[in-house]
Every structure is written in C-alpha cells, then in structure tokens.
Amino acid sequence: MSDNCLFCKIINGELPSTPVYTDEHVIVIWDINPKEPVHLLIIPREHIISLNEVEEKHDHLMAHIMLLLPKLAHEQGLDKGFRTVINTGSGGGQEVFHLHVHLLGGF
Ligand code: 5GP
Ligand code: ZN
C-alpha cells in the first residue's frame, strides 16, 4: 500500500471499482479510457512501482499474471488473439506508477 496511489486506493476499496476478476495476488478492472473494445488492467495487490522494481521474489506473481492473461482473454471472447502492454517509466508512457498489465483486443 502506498499513499496517494490510485491503484492502491482501488485495491483497498477507498475508491469504488467493479473488478472482473480478483484473487489473492491481483485484481482485474476495466480501463476507464478503453483503447480497444476490451481493455482490462491486471493489477498486482502489492504496490510495485513498475517493471523496473520487480525482483526475484516476485517470480510467482509475474508467472501468475502471465498464466492469467490468456484465461481472461478467453473469458472476454478474444478468440482471435489479444495484445498485452506494460508501460514502464515516464519514458515508456507509464502514467499510473503501480505496476499493471494492459490486456487489449476485440478489433
Ligand atoms: P499506464 O499509462 O500507466 O500504463 O496506464 C494507466 C491506465 O490507467 C490508462 O490506460 C488509464 O486510462 C487508466 N486509468 C487511469 N485512471 C483510472 C481509474 O481511475 N480507473 C480505471 N479503471 N482506469 C484508470
Ligand atoms: Zn499502488
């Protein structure tokens, strides 16, 4: 938990959200400004700033997210395929500094 982190506030319920999926490691929500018909955000419950801050101890979490992505895509009907994006740092287009994976598709 980090003060003034938008995604931490969503995770701890301070800000309302309607998750499409949750488990002990992540929550998954719709992006507020979808770039494609399906645009989900897979957000670890742990406050990790970005991919730059991922450590060996996060190996299980990162594998969990990778294995979850095709399942979520299938649930959303993205049978032709999907796109995943992780923006890292201001130079990588990251706007919310709590690690998240974008899952996009449906065009
Ligand atoms: P980034 O550029 O950091 O990779 O992506 C941040 C994403 O979070 C953007 O696609 C943006 O639309 C989304 N976003 C920003 N604020 C909110 C919010 O309050 N709720 C949700 N669901 N998504 C948000
Ligand atoms: Zn956070």
Image: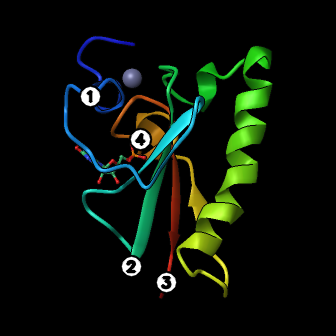
- In the rendered image, which residue does mark 3 sit on? 106
Q: Is mark 4 within 8 Å of ligand 1?
A: yes
Q: Residue at x 66, y 23 (%)?
A: 54
| Mark 3 Cα shell of 10 Å, populated few (<14), some (14-19), many (≥20) | some
Numbered label attached to residue 94: 4
Sequence-first tag of 1 and 2: 1
Q: Quadrant of residue 91?
A: top left
For the residues marked 4 and 1, what is the alpha-carbon distance in whole angstroms?
A: 23 Å
Amino acid beneath label 3 = Gly
Closest to the camera, between mark 3 and mark 1, is: 1
**Outermost residue toward the left?**
15
- In the rendered image, which residue does mark 1 sit on? 13
Relative to residue 54, is residue 65 depicted above or below?
below
Sequence-first tag of 2 and 3: 2
Amino acid beneath label 4 = Gln
For the residues marked 3 and 1, what is the alpha-carbon distance in whole angstroms?
A: 29 Å
- In the rendered image, which residue does mark 2 sit on? 37
Amino acid beneath label 1 = Gly
For the residues marked 4 and 3, what is the alpha-carbon distance in whole angstroms?
A: 23 Å
Amino acid beneath label 2 = Pro
